[in-house]
């Protein structure tokens, strides 16, 4: 039987199943039916990457995402009997009605709607400008991050119909209205031309962020501006209570629960994780490696480590990775730790970390199988939707990406992260 592409296999599986499935479940069924062939150890990550990318970039995509990391065929949304699809259908209707309301509201009131959204996002001192003499600036605000930075931002809002896209001249106009220490933001109900996107990222010019109609609606829903949330209870069967037969993939996924969900950086610089790790492993190999002694080593070896508490956190990094272990109150190298010190092979270290840290190799595969760079927010959504984590920040995503960059597996570009 001729093997199918991942997307063709997903289409066949979803058509036969007639209910929403996760990338993990789709991959399991595709492999069981011998629809796909893969040499990778994380085919579910490949499946997820291709489905996420297809939905985002292909307007005629046959798939839609519903619920938390579940996929279904568009043509099944009317016939499939699933509460998730009913919820998705209602949400899509709300999105359509919300955009219609925005198009019918007074332009000045639309500016106040955007101002309220910016306040919810985290902007301070948000102020709608006067209706005349505003030099193309509709709203002013300060974006404060952690009390450390204060970015003055000039915002222009355009309530345009679909198809009437913002051109590069609007970017130039906004720059002309801004002061030296300001940044720009344009929010529209339509979209942006390729020229506008290029101009917004032009080198040596004031950066201008762009929010199109689709993103605007997503932000309004996320921050509950102009909408409200109705909570309902939806029950589902707990499969693990009734089904003890797990496939190889399901079992493998369940085993990942034994992996550490936490990964930390190491001191010495964001591109020096490997050298810092090797210095630490060499210290452990010398022996006499009690917890107190190793914490003291961190404090003495790195100027940035100024407390035993932070040193204890760094000590857990190689332990969570499976490179050291505690025996008789002394830390020793594991077999993997010994082997890595001998070969200093980045690929070997990558596989050791992958065996011990949740969603490490999967992030790499997700990026490798994506047709375009992914933002840290998109990677965060992939992990939260496909693994049993409830992170509320991007911290753990950032730390995973930094380690993958140090290992030469990921590259950061102006447009996001790509796999290597």
Image (cartoon, helix red, strand yellow):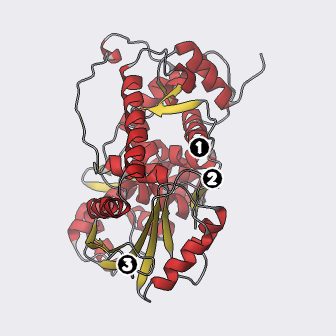
Quadrant location of the C terminus in the rendered image: bottom right
Residue 132 is marked as: 3
| Spatial separation of the CA atoms under disc 2 and disc 3 | 42 Å
Q: Position of residue 36 (x, y in %)?
A: 68, 25
> Which of 343 and 52 lies nearest the eye of the viewer?
52
Against 228, residue 44 (above or below) is: above
> In front: mark 2 or mark 3?
3
Q: Residues within 10 Å of mark 2 (few under 14, many from 20)?
A: some
Does the residue at mark 2 contact the one at mark 1 (Cβ under 8 Å)? yes
Specify which label sits upstream in the sequence, 2 or 3: 3
Question: Quadrant of the rendered structure where residue 291 is?
Answer: bottom left
Pick the front one: 256 or 380: 380
Residue situated furthest top in the rendering: 242
Which residue lies at the image location 42% right of the left edge and 59% below the top edge?
A: 398
Secondary structure of residue under mark 2: loop
* Residue 383 seen in this snapshot: yes
- The residue that mark 1 highlights is 53
Looking at the picture, tell me which residue is in the foreground, 311 or 59.
Answer: 59
């Amino acid at each position: 039987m001729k093997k199918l592409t991942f997307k063709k296999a997903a289409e066949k599986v979803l058509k036969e199943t007639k209910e929403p499935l996760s990338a993990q479940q789709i991959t399991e069924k595709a492999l069981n039916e011998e629809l796909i062939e893969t040499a990778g150890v994380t085919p579910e990550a490949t499946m997820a990457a291709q489905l996420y990318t297809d939905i985002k970039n292909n307007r005629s995509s046959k798939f839609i995402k519903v619920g938390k990391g579940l996929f279904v065929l568009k043509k099944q949304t009317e016939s499939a009997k699933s509460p998730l699809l009913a919820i998705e259908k209602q949400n899509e209707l709300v999105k359509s009605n919300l955009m219609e309301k925005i198009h019918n509201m007074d332009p000045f009131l639309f500016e106040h709607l955007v101002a309220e959204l910016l306040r919810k996002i985290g902007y301070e001192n948000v102020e709608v400008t006067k209706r005349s003499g505003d030099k193309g600036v509709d709203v002013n605000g300060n974006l404060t991050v952690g009390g450390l930075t204060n970015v003055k931002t000039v915002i222009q809002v355009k309530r345009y119909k679909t198809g009437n896209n913002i051109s590069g001249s609007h970017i130039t106009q906004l720059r002309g209205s801004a002061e030296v220490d300001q940044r720009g933001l344009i929010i529209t109900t339509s979209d942006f031309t390729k020229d506008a996107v290029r101009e917004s990222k032009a080198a040596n010019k004031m950066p201008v962020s762009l929010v199109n109609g689709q993103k605007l609606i997503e932000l309004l829903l996320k921050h509950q501006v102009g909408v409200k949330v109705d909570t309902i209870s939806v029950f589902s069967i707990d499969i693990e209570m009734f089904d003890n037969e797990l496939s190889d993939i399901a079992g493998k996924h369940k085993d990942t629960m034994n992996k550490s969900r936490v990964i930390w950086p190491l001191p010495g610089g964001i591109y020096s994780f490997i050298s810092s790790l090797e210095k630490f492993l060499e210290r452990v190999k010398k022996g006499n490696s009690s917890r107190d002694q190793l914490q003291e080593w961190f404090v003495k070896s790195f100027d940035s480590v100024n407390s035993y508490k932070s040193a204890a956190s760094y000590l857990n990094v190689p332990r969570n990775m499976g490179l050291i272990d505690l025996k008789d109150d002394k830390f020793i190298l594991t077999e993997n730790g010994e082997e890595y010190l001998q070969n200093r092979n980045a690929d070997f270290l990558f596989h050791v970390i992958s065996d011990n840290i949740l969603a490490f190799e999967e992030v790499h595969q997700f990026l490798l199988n994506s047709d375009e760079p992914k933002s840290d927010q998109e990677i965060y959504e992939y992990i939260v939707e496909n693994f049993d984590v409830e992170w509320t920040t991007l911290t753990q995503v950032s730390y995973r990406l930094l380690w993958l960059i140090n290992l030469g597996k990921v590259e950061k570009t102006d447009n996001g992260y790509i796999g290597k």
